[in-house]
Image (tube, grey):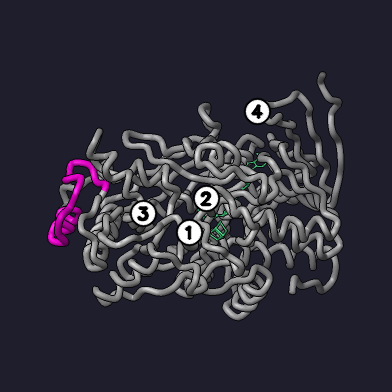
Amino acid sequence: MKLPPLEDSADFVIVGTGAGGATAARVLSAAGLSVIMVEEGPHLRPEQRERGLIAAMGQSMRDMATLSTSGSAPFPLLAGRCVGGSTAINSGIIWRLPESVRAEWARDFGLGELLDERGLGDTFDVLDRELGVGEVAADVRGGNARLMQRGAEALGLPGQIIKRNAPDCKGRARCLQGCPDGARQSMDVSYVPRALADGARLLAGVRATGVLTEAGRATGIEGERLGQDKRPTGQQVRLHARRGVIVAAGALHTPVLLRRSGLRGQVGDHYQAHPGVAVVGRFSEQVGMGFGATQAYQVPMFDRGFKLESISLPPELLAARLPGVGEEWQRLLRNLDYFAQWASITRVRATGRIRPGLISGVHVRYEPGPEDVARIRAGAATLVRMMFAAGAEEVYPGVARLPEVFQSPDQAARIEDAGVRRQDFHLMASHHFASARASDDPRHGAVDSTLQSHDLPGLYVMDAATLPTATGVNPQHTIMAVVMRAAEKLANSERPAITAA
Ligand SMILES: Cc1cc2nc3c(=O)[nH]c(=O)nc-3n(C[C@H](O)[C@H](O)[C@H](O)COP(=O)(O)OP(=O)(O)OC[C@H]3O[C@@H](n4cnc5c(N)ncnc54)[C@H](O)[C@@H]3O)c2cc1C
Ligand code: SF4
Protein backbone atom coordinates (compact mmCIF):
# COMPACT_ATOMS: atom_id res chain seq x y z
CA MET A 1 0.00 0.00 0.00
CA LYS A 2 1.35 3.39 -1.01
CA LEU A 3 1.71 5.73 1.96
CA PRO A 4 0.47 9.33 1.72
CA PRO A 5 3.17 12.00 1.21
CA LEU A 6 5.00 13.12 4.34
CA GLU A 7 5.20 16.89 4.88
CA ASP A 8 6.90 18.62 7.76
CA SER A 9 8.79 21.79 8.58
CA ALA A 10 11.55 23.09 10.83
CA ASP A 11 13.92 26.03 11.07
CA PHE A 12 16.67 23.90 9.48
CA VAL A 13 16.53 20.71 7.45
CA ILE A 14 19.84 18.82 7.47
CA VAL A 15 20.64 16.14 4.87
CA GLY A 16 23.10 13.55 6.22
CA THR A 17 24.02 12.57 9.78
CA GLY A 18 27.79 12.02 9.49
CA ALA A 19 30.60 14.13 10.91
CA GLY A 20 29.22 17.30 9.34
CA GLY A 21 25.44 16.88 9.55
CA ALA A 22 25.35 15.58 13.12
CA THR A 23 27.63 18.38 14.34
CA ALA A 24 25.43 20.99 12.68
CA ALA A 25 22.36 19.39 14.31
CA ARG A 26 24.05 19.31 17.70
CA VAL A 27 24.86 23.07 17.56
CA LEU A 28 21.62 24.35 16.06
CA SER A 29 19.31 22.31 18.27
CA ALA A 30 21.30 23.28 21.39
CA ALA A 31 20.70 26.89 20.32
CA GLY A 32 16.95 26.31 20.50
CA LEU A 33 16.39 26.13 16.74
CA SER A 34 14.17 23.40 15.38
CA VAL A 35 15.95 20.81 13.24
CA ILE A 36 14.98 17.82 11.10
CA MET A 37 17.83 15.43 10.22
CA VAL A 38 17.32 13.36 7.07
CA GLU A 39 19.41 10.22 6.61
CA GLU A 40 19.27 7.80 3.71
CA GLY A 41 20.62 4.85 5.71
CA PRO A 42 19.11 3.01 8.71
CA HIS A 43 19.28 4.02 12.36
CA LEU A 44 21.13 1.11 14.01
CA ARG A 45 21.67 0.63 17.72
CA PRO A 46 25.14 -0.75 18.66
CA GLU A 47 23.66 -4.18 19.44
CA GLN A 48 21.99 -4.29 16.00
CA ARG A 49 25.29 -3.97 14.14
CA GLU A 50 26.19 -7.12 12.20
CA ARG A 51 29.31 -9.01 13.28
CA GLY A 52 30.27 -10.62 9.98
CA LEU A 53 32.04 -8.37 7.52
CA ILE A 54 29.84 -8.98 4.48
CA ALA A 55 26.60 -8.54 6.42
CA ALA A 56 28.00 -5.42 8.12
CA MET A 57 29.03 -3.92 4.80
CA GLY A 58 25.55 -4.50 3.42
CA GLN A 59 24.04 -2.92 6.49
CA SER A 60 26.05 0.26 6.88
CA MET A 61 28.47 0.80 4.00
CA ARG A 62 27.57 2.69 0.84
CA ASP A 63 26.92 0.31 -2.09
CA MET A 64 28.76 -2.58 -0.33
CA ALA A 65 32.01 -0.66 -0.98
CA THR A 66 31.60 -1.00 -4.76
CA LEU A 67 31.54 2.73 -5.48
CA SER A 68 34.75 3.35 -7.43
CA THR A 69 36.60 5.93 -9.44
CA SER A 70 36.02 5.70 -13.17
CA GLY A 71 38.78 5.02 -15.69
CA SER A 72 41.13 2.20 -16.64
CA ALA A 73 42.11 1.13 -13.12
CA PRO A 74 39.19 2.05 -10.85
CA PHE A 75 39.66 1.95 -7.09
CA PRO A 76 37.03 1.82 -4.33
CA LEU A 77 35.80 4.89 -2.49
CA LEU A 78 34.45 3.93 0.94
CA ALA A 79 31.71 5.75 2.82
CA GLY A 80 29.11 4.98 5.45
CA ARG A 81 25.40 4.83 4.76
CA CYS A 82 23.57 4.81 8.08
CA VAL A 83 22.87 7.21 10.93
CA GLY A 84 26.33 8.48 11.88
CA GLY A 85 27.51 8.30 8.24
CA SER A 86 31.13 7.31 7.78
CA THR A 87 31.83 7.97 11.47
CA ALA A 88 29.74 4.87 12.24
CA ILE A 89 32.23 2.66 10.40
CA ASN A 90 35.47 4.52 10.97
CA SER A 91 38.38 3.79 13.31
CA GLY A 92 37.95 6.82 15.52
CA ILE A 93 41.38 8.31 14.73
CA ILE A 94 41.57 11.95 15.76
CA TRP A 95 43.84 14.60 14.30
CA ARG A 96 43.69 18.35 14.50
CA LEU A 97 44.11 20.27 11.26
CA PRO A 98 47.86 20.90 10.76
CA GLU A 99 48.70 24.59 11.12
CA SER A 100 50.32 24.70 7.66
CA VAL A 101 47.06 23.56 6.04
CA ARG A 102 44.97 25.96 8.16
CA ALA A 103 47.21 28.87 7.11
CA GLU A 104 46.93 27.81 3.44
CA TRP A 105 43.12 27.75 3.66
CA ALA A 106 43.04 31.13 5.39
CA ARG A 107 45.40 32.71 2.84
CA ASP A 108 44.24 31.11 -0.42
CA PHE A 109 40.52 30.70 0.25
CA GLY A 110 39.70 33.69 2.47
CA LEU A 111 38.74 31.50 5.44
CA GLY A 112 40.81 33.42 8.01
CA GLU A 113 37.84 34.49 10.11
CA LEU A 114 36.11 31.10 10.16
CA LEU A 115 39.39 29.36 10.94
CA ASP A 116 41.26 31.83 13.09
CA GLU A 117 43.98 29.88 14.83
CA ARG A 118 42.96 30.53 18.43
CA GLY A 119 39.23 30.06 17.88
CA LEU A 120 39.78 26.84 15.99
CA GLY A 121 41.99 25.55 18.80
CA ASP A 122 39.20 26.30 21.31
CA THR A 123 36.70 24.42 19.12
CA PHE A 124 39.01 21.40 18.97
CA ASP A 125 39.17 21.52 22.78
CA VAL A 126 35.36 21.39 22.96
CA LEU A 127 35.26 18.43 20.56
CA ASP A 128 38.00 16.61 22.49
CA ARG A 129 36.05 17.02 25.70
CA GLU A 130 32.67 16.04 24.30
CA LEU A 131 33.93 13.05 22.33
CA GLY A 132 36.37 11.67 24.90
CA VAL A 133 39.53 12.06 22.82
CA GLY A 134 42.71 10.51 24.15
CA GLU A 135 45.59 8.16 23.34
CA VAL A 136 44.71 4.49 22.96
CA ALA A 137 45.15 2.93 26.41
CA ALA A 138 48.16 0.62 26.81
CA ASP A 139 46.06 -2.47 27.57
CA VAL A 140 44.08 -2.29 24.31
CA ARG A 141 46.82 -1.42 21.79
CA GLY A 142 47.21 -5.01 20.68
CA GLY A 143 50.00 -6.89 18.92
CA ASN A 144 49.61 -5.25 15.50
CA ALA A 145 50.37 -1.80 16.94
CA ARG A 146 53.10 -3.16 19.25
CA LEU A 147 55.00 -4.55 16.26
CA MET A 148 54.59 -1.35 14.28
CA GLN A 149 56.05 0.60 17.18
CA ARG A 150 58.97 -1.81 17.25
CA GLY A 151 59.55 -1.38 13.51
CA ALA A 152 59.36 2.43 13.69
CA GLU A 153 61.74 2.59 16.63
CA ALA A 154 64.21 0.25 14.92
CA LEU A 155 64.32 2.56 11.88
CA GLY A 156 64.26 5.78 13.94
CA LEU A 157 60.94 6.91 12.41
CA PRO A 158 58.67 9.41 14.22
CA GLY A 159 56.00 7.00 15.50
CA GLN A 160 53.34 7.72 18.10
CA ILE A 161 50.30 6.21 19.79
CA ILE A 162 47.11 7.19 17.96
CA LYS A 163 44.55 9.47 19.60
CA ARG A 164 40.96 8.33 19.19
CA ASN A 165 37.48 9.23 20.33
CA ALA A 166 36.94 5.84 21.97
CA PRO A 167 37.65 6.32 25.66
CA ASP A 168 36.15 2.99 26.73
CA CYS A 169 37.48 0.90 23.83
CA LYS A 170 37.74 -2.75 24.82
CA GLY A 171 40.03 -3.62 21.91
CA ARG A 172 37.57 -5.73 19.96
CA ALA A 173 39.16 -4.65 16.60
CA ARG A 174 35.74 -4.32 15.01
CA CYS A 175 35.31 -0.62 14.29
CA LEU A 176 34.56 -1.21 10.60
CA GLN A 177 31.50 -3.32 11.49
CA GLY A 178 30.43 -0.79 14.14
CA CYS A 179 31.46 -0.77 17.78
CA PRO A 180 29.31 -3.37 19.59
CA ASP A 181 29.76 -1.50 22.88
CA GLY A 182 29.11 1.98 21.54
CA ALA A 183 32.57 2.78 22.91
CA ARG A 184 33.68 4.77 19.92
CA GLN A 185 31.99 8.16 19.97
CA SER A 186 30.77 8.09 16.40
CA MET A 187 27.95 10.49 15.61
CA ASP A 188 25.22 7.85 16.00
CA VAL A 189 26.06 7.47 19.70
CA SER A 190 27.16 11.07 20.42
CA TYR A 191 25.91 14.14 18.55
CA VAL A 192 22.82 12.60 16.95
CA PRO A 193 21.35 11.49 20.34
CA ARG A 194 22.43 14.81 21.83
CA ALA A 195 20.59 16.73 19.12
CA LEU A 196 17.53 14.48 19.61
CA ALA A 197 17.61 15.22 23.34
CA ASP A 198 17.62 18.91 22.45
CA GLY A 199 14.46 18.49 20.39
CA ALA A 200 15.77 17.66 16.90
CA ARG A 201 13.87 15.08 14.83
CA LEU A 202 15.42 12.29 12.76
CA LEU A 203 14.04 10.76 9.57
CA ALA A 204 16.16 7.70 8.81
CA GLY A 205 15.62 5.73 5.61
CA VAL A 206 14.76 8.87 3.65
CA ARG A 207 16.82 9.90 0.64
CA ALA A 208 16.87 13.57 -0.30
CA THR A 209 16.45 13.91 -4.06
CA GLY A 210 16.42 17.67 -4.51
CA VAL A 211 16.57 21.08 -2.86
CA LEU A 212 13.33 23.07 -3.03
CA THR A 213 13.57 26.76 -3.94
CA GLU A 214 11.23 29.73 -3.86
CA ALA A 215 11.98 33.24 -5.07
CA GLY A 216 15.67 32.39 -5.52
CA ARG A 217 16.12 30.95 -2.04
CA ALA A 218 16.46 27.38 -0.67
CA THR A 219 13.26 26.57 1.21
CA GLY A 220 13.42 22.84 1.87
CA ILE A 221 14.09 19.44 0.37
CA GLU A 222 12.14 16.77 -1.41
CA GLY A 223 12.90 13.13 -0.99
CA GLU A 224 11.64 9.58 -0.93
CA ARG A 225 11.17 7.02 1.80
CA LEU A 226 13.25 3.84 1.28
CA GLY A 227 12.34 0.34 2.39
CA GLN A 228 14.60 -2.13 4.18
CA ASP A 229 15.65 -3.38 0.74
CA LYS A 230 16.98 0.16 0.07
CA ARG A 231 14.45 0.68 -2.72
CA PRO A 232 11.94 3.58 -2.80
CA THR A 233 8.64 2.68 -1.15
CA GLY A 234 6.75 5.24 -3.21
CA GLN A 235 6.19 7.58 -0.25
CA GLN A 236 7.21 11.13 -1.16
CA VAL A 237 8.71 13.44 1.46
CA ARG A 238 8.66 17.25 1.46
CA LEU A 239 10.37 19.10 4.28
CA HIS A 240 10.15 22.87 4.53
CA ALA A 241 13.04 24.82 6.04
CA ARG A 242 12.09 28.20 7.47
CA ARG A 243 15.68 29.39 7.92
CA GLY A 244 17.96 27.19 5.89
CA VAL A 245 18.75 23.89 4.21
CA ILE A 246 22.02 22.23 5.24
CA VAL A 247 23.42 19.63 2.86
CA ALA A 248 25.89 17.29 4.58
CA ALA A 249 25.68 14.17 2.42
CA GLY A 250 29.48 13.74 2.33
CA ALA A 251 31.97 14.86 -0.32
CA LEU A 252 30.90 12.09 -2.73
CA HIS A 253 27.14 12.71 -2.60
CA THR A 254 26.73 16.38 -1.72
CA PRO A 255 27.78 17.58 -5.20
CA VAL A 256 25.42 15.06 -6.79
CA LEU A 257 22.43 16.32 -4.79
CA LEU A 258 23.37 19.94 -5.52
CA ARG A 259 23.83 19.35 -9.25
CA ARG A 260 20.56 17.43 -9.43
CA SER A 261 18.99 20.51 -7.81
CA GLY A 262 20.31 22.73 -10.62
CA LEU A 263 23.43 24.18 -8.95
CA ARG A 264 26.51 24.49 -11.13
CA GLY A 265 29.60 26.72 -10.82
CA GLN A 266 32.32 25.01 -8.80
CA VAL A 267 30.02 22.24 -7.54
CA GLY A 268 31.63 18.81 -8.05
CA ASP A 269 35.04 20.17 -9.08
CA HIS A 270 38.34 19.99 -7.13
CA TYR A 271 37.56 16.63 -5.45
CA GLN A 272 40.53 15.19 -3.53
CA ALA A 273 41.14 12.02 -1.50
CA HIS A 274 43.76 10.17 0.52
CA PRO A 275 44.29 6.93 -1.42
CA GLY A 276 45.76 4.20 0.74
CA VAL A 277 47.69 0.95 0.29
CA ALA A 278 48.21 -1.87 2.80
CA VAL A 279 51.06 -4.31 3.37
CA VAL A 280 50.87 -7.61 5.28
CA GLY A 281 53.74 -9.34 7.09
CA ARG A 282 54.13 -12.81 8.62
CA PHE A 283 55.84 -13.03 11.99
CA SER A 284 57.17 -16.00 13.93
CA GLU A 285 55.59 -14.61 17.11
CA GLN A 286 51.86 -14.37 17.65
CA VAL A 287 50.45 -10.98 16.55
CA GLY A 288 46.79 -11.49 17.41
CA MET A 289 45.18 -8.94 15.11
CA GLY A 290 41.80 -9.97 16.48
CA PHE A 291 42.51 -8.06 19.67
CA GLY A 292 43.26 -4.36 20.09
CA ALA A 293 41.93 -1.00 19.02
CA THR A 294 41.39 -1.23 15.25
CA GLN A 295 44.08 1.40 14.76
CA ALA A 296 46.47 2.26 17.58
CA TYR A 297 49.90 3.29 16.24
CA GLN A 298 50.94 5.69 13.49
CA VAL A 299 53.99 7.17 11.82
CA PRO A 300 53.21 10.58 10.32
CA MET A 301 55.68 11.44 7.54
CA PHE A 302 54.15 14.67 6.32
CA ASP A 303 57.39 15.91 4.74
CA ARG A 304 57.14 12.94 2.36
CA GLY A 305 53.37 13.27 1.80
CA PHE A 306 52.15 10.13 3.57
CA LYS A 307 51.11 8.75 6.93
CA LEU A 308 51.50 5.15 8.11
CA GLU A 309 48.99 3.42 10.40
CA SER A 310 48.55 0.01 11.98
CA ILE A 311 45.19 -1.37 10.87
CA SER A 312 43.60 -4.53 12.21
CA LEU A 313 41.00 -5.69 9.78
CA PRO A 314 38.53 -8.58 10.08
CA PRO A 315 39.90 -12.05 9.25
CA GLU A 316 37.82 -12.25 6.04
CA LEU A 317 39.73 -9.29 4.60
CA LEU A 318 43.09 -10.50 5.85
CA ALA A 319 42.56 -13.90 4.23
CA ALA A 320 42.05 -12.19 0.88
CA ARG A 321 45.48 -10.53 1.22
CA LEU A 322 47.42 -13.77 1.69
CA PRO A 323 49.43 -15.04 -1.30
CA GLY A 324 49.26 -18.46 -2.92
CA VAL A 325 46.48 -20.91 -3.73
CA GLY A 326 45.25 -24.35 -2.61
CA GLU A 327 47.22 -26.12 0.10
CA GLU A 328 49.79 -23.32 0.40
CA TRP A 329 47.08 -20.70 0.98
CA GLN A 330 45.26 -22.94 3.46
CA ARG A 331 48.48 -23.33 5.44
CA LEU A 332 48.73 -19.55 5.81
CA LEU A 333 45.05 -19.39 6.67
CA ARG A 334 45.56 -21.78 9.60
CA ASN A 335 48.01 -19.25 11.07
CA LEU A 336 45.98 -16.05 10.81
CA ASP A 337 47.17 -14.98 14.23
CA TYR A 338 50.73 -14.51 12.97
CA PHE A 339 50.08 -11.70 10.51
CA ALA A 340 50.30 -7.95 10.92
CA GLN A 341 48.83 -5.36 8.57
CA TRP A 342 49.76 -1.71 8.20
CA ALA A 343 48.61 0.94 5.75
CA SER A 344 49.91 4.11 4.16
CA ILE A 345 47.56 6.97 3.30
CA THR A 346 48.78 9.57 0.84
CA ARG A 347 48.11 13.30 0.58
CA VAL A 348 47.49 13.38 -3.15
CA ARG A 349 47.82 16.64 -5.09
CA ALA A 350 45.65 15.66 -8.06
CA THR A 351 42.07 16.89 -8.18
CA GLY A 352 39.08 15.09 -9.67
CA ARG A 353 35.50 15.74 -10.70
CA ILE A 354 32.19 14.41 -9.38
CA ARG A 355 29.00 14.38 -11.41
CA PRO A 356 25.65 12.61 -11.09
CA GLY A 357 26.06 9.17 -12.63
CA LEU A 358 23.86 6.37 -13.84
CA ILE A 359 25.44 3.45 -11.98
CA SER A 360 25.28 4.07 -8.20
CA GLY A 361 24.29 7.63 -8.94
CA VAL A 362 27.81 9.04 -8.60
CA HIS A 363 30.46 9.38 -11.28
CA VAL A 364 33.94 10.15 -9.93
CA ARG A 365 36.78 11.00 -12.30
CA TYR A 366 39.97 11.00 -10.29
CA GLU A 367 43.49 10.03 -11.20
CA PRO A 368 46.55 10.49 -8.96
CA GLY A 369 49.40 12.16 -10.91
CA PRO A 370 53.09 11.15 -11.22
CA GLU A 371 54.14 13.04 -8.06
CA ASP A 372 51.31 11.34 -6.15
CA VAL A 373 52.32 7.91 -7.40
CA ALA A 374 55.88 8.54 -6.20
CA ARG A 375 54.45 9.23 -2.73
CA ILE A 376 52.33 6.06 -2.84
CA ARG A 377 55.43 4.05 -3.79
CA ALA A 378 57.48 5.63 -1.00
CA GLY A 379 54.78 4.90 1.59
CA ALA A 380 54.46 1.24 0.59
CA ALA A 381 58.25 0.75 0.51
CA THR A 382 58.59 2.27 3.99
CA LEU A 383 55.93 -0.13 5.31
CA VAL A 384 57.90 -3.10 3.93
CA ARG A 385 61.13 -1.90 5.56
CA MET A 386 59.35 -1.35 8.89
CA MET A 387 57.84 -4.84 8.75
CA PHE A 388 61.25 -6.45 8.37
CA ALA A 389 62.73 -4.13 11.02
CA ALA A 390 59.98 -5.36 13.39
CA GLY A 391 60.99 -8.97 12.73
CA ALA A 392 58.71 -10.13 9.90
CA GLU A 393 59.81 -13.40 8.31
CA GLU A 394 58.21 -12.46 5.01
CA VAL A 395 56.18 -9.56 3.68
CA TYR A 396 53.37 -9.45 1.10
CA PRO A 397 53.62 -6.07 -0.63
CA GLY A 398 50.38 -6.46 -2.60
CA VAL A 399 51.84 -4.77 -5.70
CA ALA A 400 51.05 -6.28 -9.11
CA ARG A 401 54.00 -7.35 -11.30
CA LEU A 402 56.26 -7.68 -8.24
CA PRO A 403 56.87 -10.93 -6.32
CA GLU A 404 53.91 -11.82 -4.08
CA VAL A 405 56.32 -12.50 -1.23
CA PHE A 406 59.35 -10.42 -0.21
CA GLN A 407 62.02 -12.24 1.82
CA SER A 408 64.29 -9.30 2.66
CA PRO A 409 64.11 -5.52 3.22
CA ASP A 410 66.33 -4.87 0.17
CA GLN A 411 63.36 -5.81 -2.01
CA ALA A 412 61.46 -2.72 -0.80
CA ALA A 413 63.46 -0.68 -3.31
CA ARG A 414 61.65 -2.52 -6.11
CA ILE A 415 58.42 -0.71 -5.12
CA GLU A 416 60.19 2.65 -5.44
CA ASP A 417 61.25 1.78 -8.96
CA ALA A 418 59.65 4.26 -11.38
CA GLY A 419 58.50 1.26 -13.43
CA VAL A 420 55.85 0.50 -10.79
CA ARG A 421 52.69 2.17 -12.04
CA ARG A 422 49.65 3.52 -10.25
CA GLN A 423 47.62 0.61 -11.66
CA ASP A 424 49.92 -1.87 -9.88
CA PHE A 425 48.68 -0.74 -6.46
CA HIS A 426 45.41 -1.87 -4.87
CA LEU A 427 44.33 1.57 -3.78
CA MET A 428 41.27 2.51 -1.81
CA ALA A 429 40.17 5.82 -0.31
CA SER A 430 37.98 6.59 2.67
CA HIS A 431 38.79 10.31 3.14
CA HIS A 432 37.04 12.56 0.61
CA PHE A 433 37.31 16.34 0.27
CA ALA A 434 36.72 19.59 -1.57
CA SER A 435 33.91 18.75 -4.01
CA ALA A 436 31.93 21.85 -2.97
CA ARG A 437 34.82 23.72 -1.49
CA ALA A 438 34.63 26.91 0.53
CA SER A 439 36.19 30.10 -0.77
CA ASP A 440 35.22 33.73 -0.38
CA ASP A 441 35.73 34.06 -4.13
CA PRO A 442 32.89 32.45 -6.15
CA ARG A 443 35.36 31.77 -8.97
CA HIS A 444 37.19 29.35 -6.67
CA GLY A 445 34.53 27.85 -4.41
CA ALA A 446 30.93 26.65 -4.29
CA VAL A 447 30.20 28.13 -0.84
CA ASP A 448 31.47 31.22 0.98
CA SER A 449 33.25 31.44 4.31
CA THR A 450 29.94 31.02 6.18
CA LEU A 451 29.47 27.80 4.15
CA GLN A 452 26.46 29.33 2.37
CA SER A 453 26.13 28.70 -1.35
CA HIS A 454 27.41 31.51 -3.57
CA ASP A 455 24.47 30.93 -5.89
CA LEU A 456 21.52 29.95 -3.69
CA PRO A 457 20.88 31.90 -0.48
CA GLY A 458 19.58 29.77 2.38
CA LEU A 459 21.54 26.70 1.19
CA TYR A 460 24.54 25.67 3.30
CA VAL A 461 27.02 22.84 2.80
CA MET A 462 28.43 21.49 6.07
CA ASP A 463 30.55 18.41 5.47
CA ALA A 464 33.89 17.29 4.02
CA ALA A 465 32.93 18.71 0.63
CA THR A 466 33.61 22.24 1.89
CA LEU A 467 37.17 21.59 3.09
CA PRO A 468 39.19 23.38 0.39
CA THR A 469 41.85 20.66 0.00
CA ALA A 470 42.84 17.29 1.41
CA THR A 471 44.08 17.73 4.97
CA GLY A 472 46.91 15.16 4.91
CA VAL A 473 45.57 13.85 8.24
CA ASN A 474 42.48 11.87 9.24
CA PRO A 475 39.73 14.41 8.63
CA GLN A 476 36.74 13.83 10.93
CA HIS A 477 37.86 16.20 13.69
CA THR A 478 38.54 18.98 11.17
CA ILE A 479 35.15 18.50 9.52
CA MET A 480 33.42 18.68 12.90
CA ALA A 481 35.43 21.75 13.98
CA VAL A 482 34.79 23.68 10.75
CA VAL A 483 31.08 22.81 10.88
CA MET A 484 30.80 23.57 14.59
CA ARG A 485 32.22 27.04 14.03
CA ALA A 486 30.08 27.74 10.96
CA ALA A 487 26.93 26.42 12.68
CA GLU A 488 27.60 28.57 15.75
CA LYS A 489 27.87 31.60 13.49
CA LEU A 490 24.66 30.64 11.79
CA ALA A 491 22.89 30.15 15.11
CA ASN A 492 24.18 33.50 16.33
CA SER A 493 22.94 35.21 13.21
CA GLU A 494 19.47 33.85 14.11
CA ARG A 495 19.70 34.38 17.88
CA PRO A 496 22.27 36.51 19.75
CA ALA A 497 25.46 35.13 21.37
CA ILE A 498 25.26 31.33 21.41
CA THR A 499 28.33 29.12 21.67
CA ALA A 500 28.53 25.34 21.53
CA ALA A 501 30.68 25.00 24.66
C1 LIG B 1 36.15 2.92 6.62
C2 LIG B 1 36.43 4.35 7.01
C3 LIG B 1 37.36 4.61 8.04
C4 LIG B 1 37.66 5.93 8.39
N1 LIG B 1 38.48 6.17 9.47
C5 LIG B 1 38.63 7.46 9.90
C6 LIG B 1 39.32 7.74 11.10
O1 LIG B 1 39.75 6.83 11.82
N2 LIG B 1 39.51 9.04 11.46
C7 LIG B 1 39.04 10.07 10.69
O2 LIG B 1 39.28 11.23 11.03
N3 LIG B 1 38.32 9.83 9.57
C8 LIG B 1 38.08 8.56 9.18
N4 LIG B 1 37.32 8.31 8.08
C9 LIG B 1 36.75 9.46 7.35
C10 LIG B 1 35.60 10.12 8.12
O3 LIG B 1 34.75 9.16 8.66
C11 LIG B 1 34.87 11.03 7.11
O4 LIG B 1 35.81 11.96 6.59
C12 LIG B 1 33.72 11.79 7.72
O5 LIG B 1 32.81 10.96 8.38
C13 LIG B 1 33.01 12.56 6.60
O6 LIG B 1 31.97 13.30 7.16
P1 LIG B 1 30.81 13.87 6.23
O7 LIG B 1 29.83 14.52 7.11
O8 LIG B 1 31.43 14.63 5.12
O9 LIG B 1 30.18 12.57 5.51
P2 LIG B 1 29.66 11.19 6.13
O10 LIG B 1 30.15 10.99 7.51
O11 LIG B 1 29.99 10.15 5.13
O12 LIG B 1 28.07 11.37 6.21
C14 LIG B 1 27.28 11.58 5.06
C15 LIG B 1 25.89 10.99 5.33
O13 LIG B 1 24.98 11.51 4.36
C16 LIG B 1 24.10 10.45 4.00
N5 LIG B 1 23.53 10.78 2.67
C17 LIG B 1 24.20 10.82 1.49
N6 LIG B 1 23.36 11.17 0.50
C18 LIG B 1 22.14 11.35 1.07
C19 LIG B 1 20.86 11.72 0.56
N7 LIG B 1 20.67 12.00 -0.74
N8 LIG B 1 19.83 11.79 1.42
C20 LIG B 1 20.00 11.51 2.76
N9 LIG B 1 21.20 11.15 3.28
C21 LIG B 1 22.25 11.08 2.45
C22 LIG B 1 24.98 9.23 3.99
O14 LIG B 1 24.20 8.04 4.05
C23 LIG B 1 25.84 9.48 5.21
O15 LIG B 1 25.26 8.92 6.36
C24 LIG B 1 37.02 7.01 7.70
C25 LIG B 1 36.09 6.74 6.68
C26 LIG B 1 35.79 5.43 6.34
C27 LIG B 1 34.78 5.18 5.24
S1 SF4 C 1 38.18 -1.52 18.65
FE1 SF4 C 1 37.32 -0.48 20.41
S2 SF4 C 1 36.17 1.16 19.53
FE2 SF4 C 1 36.56 -0.25 17.86
S3 SF4 C 1 34.79 -1.58 17.84
FE3 SF4 C 1 36.24 -2.48 19.17
S4 SF4 C 1 35.77 -1.81 21.26
FE4 SF4 C 1 34.74 -0.48 19.81
Q: Residue at left 33%, top 67%? A: 147
Badge 2 element: helix
Return the residue nearer the eye: 379 or 490: 379
Residue 403 drawn in magenta: yes
Q: Do the residues labelled 2 and 1 touch (CB within 8 Å)?
A: yes
Q: Residue at left 78%, top 47%? A: 202
Q: How far apart are marks 1 and 3 (CA)?
A: 15 Å
* Location of residue 238 in the rendering, given as x and y in whole percent from the top left corner: 81, 35
Q: How far apart are marks 4 and 2 (CA)?
A: 21 Å
Badge 4 element: loop
Return the residue nearer the eye: 448 or 79: 79
Badge 1 element: loop
- The crowd level at tag 1 (other Cα within 10 Å; few <14, some 14-19, many 20+) is many
Residue 11 drawn in magenta: no
Which one is earlier in the sequence, the residue at label 2 or at label 1? Answer: 2
Residue placed under numbered mark 4 in the picture: 229
Q: In which quarter of the image is the C terminus?
A: bottom right
Quadrant assignment, res 347: bottom left
Q: How far apart are marks 1 and 4 (CA)?
A: 30 Å
Please determine whether, in this image, residue 434 is positioned above or below residue 8: below
> Can you tell which mark lies on residue 337?
3
Q: Are marks 4 and 3 in contact (CB under 8 Å)?
A: no
Return the residue nearer the eye: 428 or 190: 190
Residue placed under numbered mark 1 in the picture: 294
The answer to whether any part of residue 456 appears in the image is no
Please determine whether, in this image, residue 71 is positioned above or below residue 431: above
Decide if ligand 1 comes within 8 Å of the CB at mark 4. no
Return the residue nearer the eye: 236 or 315: 315
Residue placed under numbered mark 2 in the picture: 176
Mark 1 vs mark 4, foreground winner is: 1
